[in-house]
């Protein structure tokens, strides 16, 4: 794959220091290898793509007219088919060689027609070179373009300015690489919008500069997420769930995905683990994954432990069961290693729910 990509965009290996110097005038961005795929991204990718289209001409902090509409999935039925063009279009051939999933582009209204109007050498090559210099691993370039083909709309000068902005704010090279790779939409936002959003998180959660950078690098999608939804979840966590401000800050830094979770689902999980399982706020803070795990899994595993008489979550007592095991690992691992039972018993129990 690496040889195919190098041939397609004619770039030097990322170890070449000159490419880094060209890419960032203040801080060189190395091309570190990232073997881990963008996890949990496809679940709400379409939401963010729709949001990006909606927000292009809207002030960043202006409330959306209908928050529910932003959360709705777009039409997922293919409105176009690349099949008749792949063998005739050099651009499509090059995209396929990079690993772009054309069938996903077909599902987005207007995107297929937009891509067909592009010429690989004229409109794409330098953008792909830029992304490579920014640290996007070669094996993930296709995934990046699949998620955000609108990157080719942006002027290279503007993209460079957005990278330079991160350099000027003391983001280290590894953080910049992670931000660009993990959030293909980040570079679509101009520096003023990104600055306002980083400023919002810093002020709303009383973060220092290092904490802002850590948050942005840990979950870069949150920074460009729908701000109305972020504020709604902040209110829910602090006012409805009763976490103190310092606890809210801790939750944000430990598990920022909470702020991208459906608000109603988040409240439902909290109600179950706090009111029915009787977990304290302190215990939830120790295992924030409970707030981003589907409640049915927690109910199944907690219910099974209760059935066995093993719901002992206090680490200071005997037969302690870590709360983390309610959300991590496979069912088989949970049943055999944690509950000390067998799958036949577990499956029979599930039938009683």
Image (cartoon, helix red, strand yellow):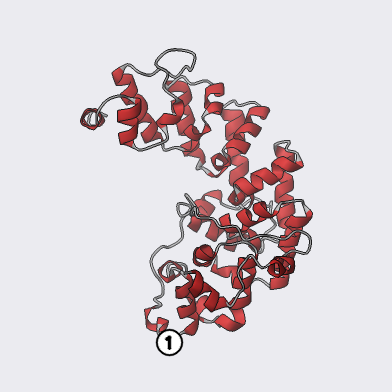
Residue 322 % position (x, y): 44, 25
Q: Residue at position x 22%, y 31% from top? A: 351
Q: Residue at position x 30%, y 29% from top? A: 336
Q: How many marks?
A: 1
Report which quarter residue 123 is drawn in. bottom right
Q: Which residue is mark 1?
A: 88
* Residue located farthest toward the top when viewing the structure as drawn: 317
- Left or right of residue 351: residue 118: right
- Left or right of residue 73: residue 60: right
Q: Is residue 284 above or below residue 69?
A: above
Q: Is residue 27 above or below residue 100?
A: above
Q: Residue at position x 66%, y 60% from top? A: 30
Residue 175 % position (x, y): 66, 51
The quarter of the image holding the C terminus is top left
The crowd level at tag 1 (other Cα within 10 Å; few <14, some 14-19, many 20+) is few
Residue 53 % position (x, y): 58, 63
* Secondary structure state at the residue bearing disc 1: loop
Q: Is residue 144 visible in the rendered structure shown here? A: no
Q: Is residue 108 above or below residue 91?
A: above
Report which quarter residue 273 is drawn in. top left
Residue 179 % position (x, y): 62, 54
Q: Nearer the viewer, residue 84 or 340?
A: 340
Q: Is residue 239 visible in the rendered structure shown here? A: yes
């Amino acid at each position: 794959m690496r040889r195919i990509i190098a041939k397609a965009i004619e770039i030097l290996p990322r170890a070449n220091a000159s490419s880094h110097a060209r890419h960032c005038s203040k801080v060189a961005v190395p091309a570190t290898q990232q073997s881990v795929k963008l996890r949990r991204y496809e679940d709400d990718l379409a939401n963010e793509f729709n949001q990006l289209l909606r927000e292009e001409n809207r002030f960043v902090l202006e409330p959306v007219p209908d928050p529910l509409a932003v959360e709705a999935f777009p039409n997922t039925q293919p409105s176009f088919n690349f099949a008749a063009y792949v063998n005739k279009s050099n651009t499509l051939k090059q995209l396929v060689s990079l690993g772009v999933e054309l069938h996903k582009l077909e599902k987005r209204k207007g995107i297929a027609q937009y891509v067909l109007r592009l010429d690989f050498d004229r409109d794409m090559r330098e953008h792909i070179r830029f992304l490579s210099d920014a640290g996007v691993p070669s094996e993930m370039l296709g995934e990046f373009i699949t998620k955000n083909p609108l990157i080719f709309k942006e002027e290279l000068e503007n993209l460079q300015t957005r990278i330079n902005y991160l350099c000027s704010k003391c983001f280290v090279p590894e953080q910049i690489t992670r931000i660009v790779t993990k959030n293909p939409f980040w570079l679509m936002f101009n520096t003023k919008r990104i600055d306002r959003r980083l400023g919002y998180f810093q002020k709303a959660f009383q973060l220092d500069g290092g904490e802002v950078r850590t948050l942005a690098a840990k979950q870069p999608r949150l920074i460009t997420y729908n701000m109305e939804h972020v504020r709604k979840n902040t209110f829910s966590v602090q006012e409805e769930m009763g976490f103190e401000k310092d606890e809210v800050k801790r939750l944000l830094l430990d598990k920022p995905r909470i702020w991208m979770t459906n608000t109603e689902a988040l409240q439902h999980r909290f109600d179950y683990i706090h009111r029915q399982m009787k977990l304290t706020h302190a215990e939830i803070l120790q295992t924030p994954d409970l707030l981003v795990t589907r409640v049915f899994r927690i109910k199944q595993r907690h219910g099974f432990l209760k059935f066995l008489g093993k719901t002992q979550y206090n680490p200071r007592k005997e037969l302690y069961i870590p709360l983390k095991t309610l959300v991590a690992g496979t069912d088989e691992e949970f049943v055999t290693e944690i509950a000390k039972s067998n799958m036949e018993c577990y499956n029979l129990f599930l039938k009683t729910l």
